Image (cartoon, helix red, strand yellow):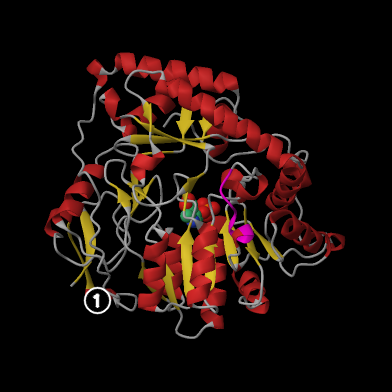
Amino acid sequence: MEFASIAEALNARGRTAIRWCTPSLNPALLRVHEPYDSDASISFESFGLPMEPTGLFRLAFEKAAVVFGSEHTLFSVNGTTWSNFVVIKALAKQVPNLRVLASRNVHRSVVGACEDYGVRLMFLPTRMHERFHTFIPNATNEILDGIARTKPQVLLLTTPTYEGLTVNLCEVIDRARKLDPRLVIFVDEAWGAHLHFSPRLPVSAMAAGADICVQSTHKQGGSLQQTGMIHWQGNRINTDLVTDAYRTLGSSSPSYLLLASLEAAGAELAANGSDRLNHMIDLAGQLSDAVASVPGFAIADIHEMTPGVEVDRDTTKVIVDVSGSGLSGYEVARRLELDHSVIVEAYNVSTVLLLVPFGATLADVATTRVSLETIAKERGPRLEHQLDLPGSLPKVLELTDVSRLLPEQLEDVPLLEAVGRICGEHLTPFPPGIPTTIKGEQLTAELVAYYDQLRLIPNVHIAARNPSLESICVVR
Ligand SMILES: Cc1ncc(COP(=O)(O)O)c(C=O)c1O
């Protein structure tokens, strides 16, 4: 390992790398000076209490609600992962025997929270783009059919997707409410903290009329890593239960630095968000042109990706199709980071995903183009991974309800012997962190072959009981 500590690595690389990734830190934020000297705790009684909230904290939450167009807002210092636990805990208390219908691209925190709070999680049909290995949004009719068929009390949509594609949220909400006026609409808007601030971006969950949403403000809202917000409105959400879950699950010592950064991100978005996002969207256009000018690299065509589905998209994101280069997205991302200090947001077999952060410049675009040109020229002799990943991930998702399995009902078997078995754990490749297999799904031959190749790629990390995936946990 090149560095002896995390601090050393951040000091050496954090500032100098070109970032097309989170955290999208807004350089104009009101900053805490000398964070190591200025950090504080609830012992500073005159500041108020963050978890109640009172004092400065209550004020900050109220201001954020106005800025983000909600009625109530709470700050998270443990990302959207934690916010999902808070919201699902509150909803599980509000609705006995809660049934949630969700799009399949849920984050693992959703699956974990539903399991912990005894919530029945049901899925809409999986929609994946075959070649790009990415989830794409469900069509409105698919969502409405799912509601009519499963009669959930909560509809949970993960929109935008990781790649920035969104369902037609206004239409979905409007028509879902006609089917069931009591249906709670919960949006995992981890990737959409910035949407509310530019008419050039898809509509935000709150503006579209969702009841509750969670956002990772650190991803695209400008604040420090690990920060997020929960917003809600209207009378379908029990506010006391949300604040109760917030208090019981939250640390009694949340980071004041992170809370300050969240408050500053909201204030900055309110003051200058539209101008900044205009700049970022234009820069994403310039980045797309620069990337597409390099032989072997192309920009993914969204309409080709989502046939028959009306989607909108976040134009601060650029999906690069690398398949013409003869390299996989894994390899392009690795070379960009190790040889050129250019960090991309995510990668898979045929794409790399570039996210334009607040701090990006035209000089970053130029350097990235030169880096890709170098990689394209060097391609031949350095081709390291000949991948033969399947064209699509299986869509067979007949979920067996295994939420109450006891440890003795599970066993570990070698990966290649798991074909046809019911998976007893969640398998989540990073990036992007969305489970490709959820506990209770069947491990098809295609899926096992996929994992068998994926596990050997150096810059892929699989969150699993045995991260090497030599063995896998299945139901006996
Ligand atoms: C859809 C979705 N929800 C939740 C999360 C978790 O967010 P955080 O990293 O802020 O905890 C992620 C993370 O990538 C995500 O993609």
Q: Which quadrant would residue 242 be assigned to in this image?
A: bottom right
Tell me if residue 360 is in the magenta stretch: no
Label 1: few (<14), some or many (≥20) within 10 Å? few
Looking at this view, name the residue that lies furthest to the right: 46
Image quarter hosting the N terminus: top left
Q: Residue at x 41, y 71 (%)?
A: 101
Position of residue 26 measured from the top left corner of the image (x, y, whole percent) = 67, 38
Q: What residue span does the magenta drawing correspond to?
A: 201-207
Position of residue 10 measured from the top left corner of the image (x, y, whole percent) = 56, 34
Amino acid tagged 1 = Glu
Position of residue 424 measured from the top left corner of the image (x, y, whole percent) = 27, 67
Position of residue 190 measured from the top left corner of the image (x, y, whole percent) = 54, 53
Residue 141: in sight, yes or no?
A: yes
Side of 149 where 61 appears, left or right: right
Image quarter hosting the C terminus: bottom left
Tell me if residue 231 comes above or below residue 225 in the rendering. below
Instruction: Judge by depth and name the residue closer to the eye, 9 or 22.
Output: 22
Which residue has dot 1 on it? Answer: 408
Q: Secondary structure at mark 1?
A: helix
Q: Residue at x 44, y 28 (%)?
A: 2
Side of 135 where 399 appears, left or right: left
Instruction: Judge by depth and name the residue closer to the eye, 5 or 344.
Output: 344
